[in-house]
Amino acid sequence: MSRPTKQSPERGSARTRLLEAARDIVRTKGFAATTVDDLCRAADVTKGAFFHHFASKDALGVAAAEFWAATTTGFFEAAPYHDPADPLERVLAYVAFRKAIIMGELAEFTCLVGTMAQEVYASFPDIRDACGRSIFGHTATLEGDIEAARQDRGITDDWTAESLARHTQAVIQGGFVLAKAGNDPELARESLDHLNRYIRYLFHVTEEEDIA
């Protein structure tokens, strides 16, 4: 979800370095193609250290999803899209923020838990469930602003804040897939532009209204 910077091997505990390595390598190679040797080499730790902290690669996958959720939560809590007083402006600012952080290489802006969920949903249910907790946990943070915007603008149409919050993540994750398939980050940004238009449509925003 966010774009955490890579840490040098000297920083943090061995466990943290392994989780950071998983964050970066899995987004590049996928979970199945990432080996314990890859992780140990990137983290500058021994295999003994790996198995001291994680019983298996699968356990590392669950921990990596939880690490992603924990580290991205603060990133989004501090983001500027919370600043507008108007709740609809906050929702649209969130979409604009998600577009703004699509930069750099594909592996730098795509989502670890989205990447793993697509790959392991049937083969590693514990990792899938950890990814789901991360994705749906983030989704829930949007519901308050969406519901406030519904109340503020008198929206009574047959959709809920929860369903729109989930749809934002469907568009974002789908945009990441398109960017990977086309090797073009602009495809993900394009998806966010369409999401912006869709939200404006749902809230009956006219062209004359001054909403960011």
Image (tube, rainbow, N blue to C red):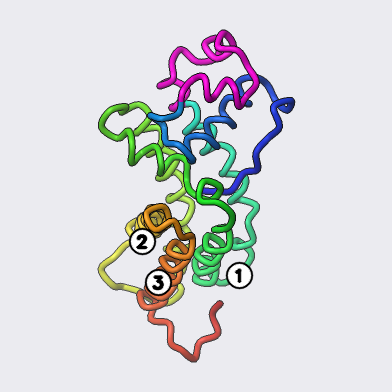
Q: Which residue is mark 3?
A: 194
Q: In the rendered image of this protein, does residue 192 appear above or below residue 68?
A: below
Q: Nearer the viewer, mark 3 or mark 2?
A: 3
Per the model, the C-alpha gap separating discs 1 and 2 is: 20 Å
Q: Main secondary structure of the magenta part?
A: helix
Q: Indicate which disc, 1 or 2, sits on the residue closer to the N terminus.
A: 1
Q: Secondary structure at mark 2?
A: helix
Q: Indicate which disc, 3 or 2, sits on the residue closer to the N terminus.
A: 2
Instruction: Determine crowd level at label 2: few under 14, some 14-19, many 20+ residues with C-alpha closer than 10 A.
Output: some
Of residues 48 and 135, the one drawn nearer to the viewer in this rendering: 48
Q: Residue at x 47, y 35 (%)?
A: 26
Residue 173 place in picture, x, y as percent: 40, 53
Q: Secondary structure at mark 3?
A: helix
Q: Indicate which disc, 3 or 1, sits on the residue closer to the N terminus.
A: 1
59 is within the stretch colored magenta:
yes
Q: Name the quarter where the C terminus is drawn.
A: bottom right
101 is within the stretch colored magenta:
no
Per the model, the C-alpha gap separating discs 3 and 1 is: 24 Å
Instruction: Name the side, left or right, on which 54 lies relative to 197.
Output: right
Q: Which residues are magenta?
A: 35-62
Residue 181 place in picture, x, y as percent: 37, 54
Of residues 36 and 70, the one drawn nearer to the viewer in this rendering: 36
Q: Residue furthest bottom?
A: 208
* Quadrant of res 17: top right
Instruction: Determine crowd level at label 3: few under 14, some 14-19, many 20+ residues with C-alpha closer than 10 A.
Output: few
Q: Nearer the viewer, mark 1 or mark 2?
A: 2
Q: Which residue is mark 2?
A: 164
Q: Which residue type does callout 1 highlight?
A: Ala
Per the model, the C-alpha gap separating discs 3 and 2 is: 14 Å
Q: Which residue is mark 1?
A: 85
Q: Residue at x 39, y 58 (%)?
A: 182
Q: Which residue type does callout 2 highlight?
A: Leu
